[in-house]
Amino acid sequence: MRSRLLPLLIILMAAVLLALGIPLAVSLAAAQQQKVVVDRIDDTAHFASLAQFVDIDSPNGSPLAPPGERGKTLQKELVKYHKVYGIKAGVFYRGRGPMAHAPTNWNLPEEGEVLDPEEDEVLDSFNEALASRRSHEPAQVWPWQRNRLVVASPVIRDGDVVAVVVTDSPTGQMRSRILYGWLIIGAGEAAAMLLALGAALRLTGWVLRPVRVLDATTHDIATGRLKSRVAAAGGPPELRRLARSFNEMADNVEDVLEQQRAFVADASHQLRNPLSALLLRIELLALELPEGNEEIASVRTEGKRLAQVLDDLLDLALAEHTEADLRLTDIGELTAERVASWSPVADDKGVRLVGACPATTAWADPIALSSALDAVIDNALKFTPEGECVEVEVASDGKVSTIVVTDRGPGLSDEELARIGDRFWRSAGHQNIKGSGLGLSISRTLLAAGGGSIAYDRHEPHGLRVTVTVPRSGPAA
């Protein structure tokens, strides 16, 4: 959940920072350019005031004679201005001839001359100033461009425009200042993003910590560790209240299950005494009847079957209640012992019981695993015809160890395989075979308590394959 929530918060915070940073960067660039433009306007106004007093003898604004002292003073000012600031500046008559300019090789383009974009911008600014207007606001210059800033102001004498002051400024320093300001904004955005990321990590951790604890506890309970509870943790009040409610629910569920187990165990135990007395009276009654009486034999069989069911119910209740005593166990050795114990039974039935049990270790409760193997091997021997074989094979990989018991019995259909292991369930074709239908259920319960499992599959051409799996990793892992 954290991997999904955290990117969402990061994207939202990045969007907010970009929404604030981009307008700020644009505003900074506009402010820097406006500052330069205002400086150029002041400079052109100063040069225009000097140019007002330069003698102009021709009606079209072109000089008929060399400039006087005022014209020389204007030229010196322009040369000094260009030398200090590197800005091209000039005062041009209406006919585009220079009154004074610096550098001296910088002139306005002639009529009909092919213009590049920079010259075209200078000429447009000059023409606007001739109409008694200051040149239009220059287009915004960005750090990746090499544009120049052109500003023009008219020189007015007696209400008429007699000349135009034009400045053509390089933008390198301005672009550097804009870029530097952008770097500061970017650094601030990065710092804010890191701060926001740290806050998001703390926030998601604070919010999701109770959820992780609740998830782990739920998994523990689902895998049979009913004593697990949600530990006290921080987080929002709603999640803390949820944790308390979950613990209350787990307590109630555990109480109900405990009552159920106790009822099954007590009922099984309490029924054994009257059932034993009943079986004893049946035996005494059988002594009074002729030997071989079918009715008394049937009653005796059903009584023994009921006693077996009660014993299995008691075993099941104990299996569900007892916690697994996990230890590192030699699965091969334990399986070989169970095969040896069941070999006499197999010999009596005329069934070959074969075991391939190499040494391999796994974490298991030896008593629970032995009981589960007894139930599986007993079940295989019951349904294997005389002359056939039951194979027991132990194998392992890096994660689990397996014990595979294969018989040559009639096998089960797909529908029956889906139900095998259910309590009291027996195949319709095997009702005449001794059993209560609880043996495999007990095996599954015993194995699940230690993290193991049991699976069933068909064995070709006929028979059943039962696979018992136990983990090789310890409880801590």
Image (cartoon, rainbow, N blue to C red):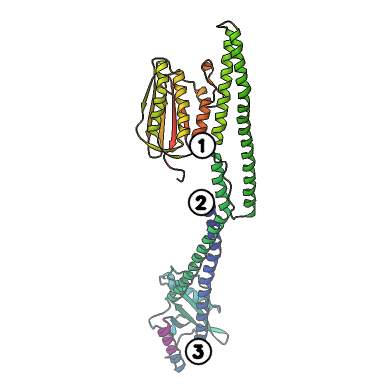
Alpha carbon separation for disc pair 1 and 2: 32 Å
Residue at 44%, 29% in the rendered image: 467
Q: Position of residue 397 (x, y in %)?
A: 37, 37
Callout 1: SS: helix
Kindly report which numbered mark, 1 or 2, lies closer to the viewer in this rendering. Answer: 1
Mark 2: amino acid: Ser
Q: Residues within 10 Å of mark 3 (few under 14, many from 20)?
A: some
Residue, disc 1: 449
Closer to the chain start, of discs 3 and 1, is: 3
Closer to the camera, 126 or 96? 126
Q: Is residue 81 magenta?
A: yes
Mark 3 — residue? 50
Q: Is residue 308 above or below residue 200?
A: above
Q: Is residue 130 visible?
A: yes
Secondary structure, mark 2, is helix
User: How far separated are the C-alphas under marks 2 and 3?
Assistant: 70 Å
> Are circles 3 and 1 on residues that touch, CB within 8 Å?
no
Earlier-in-chain disc, 2 versus 3? 2
Residue 141 in sight: no
Residue under pointer 2: 3
Task: Label 3: state its secondary structure.
Answer: helix
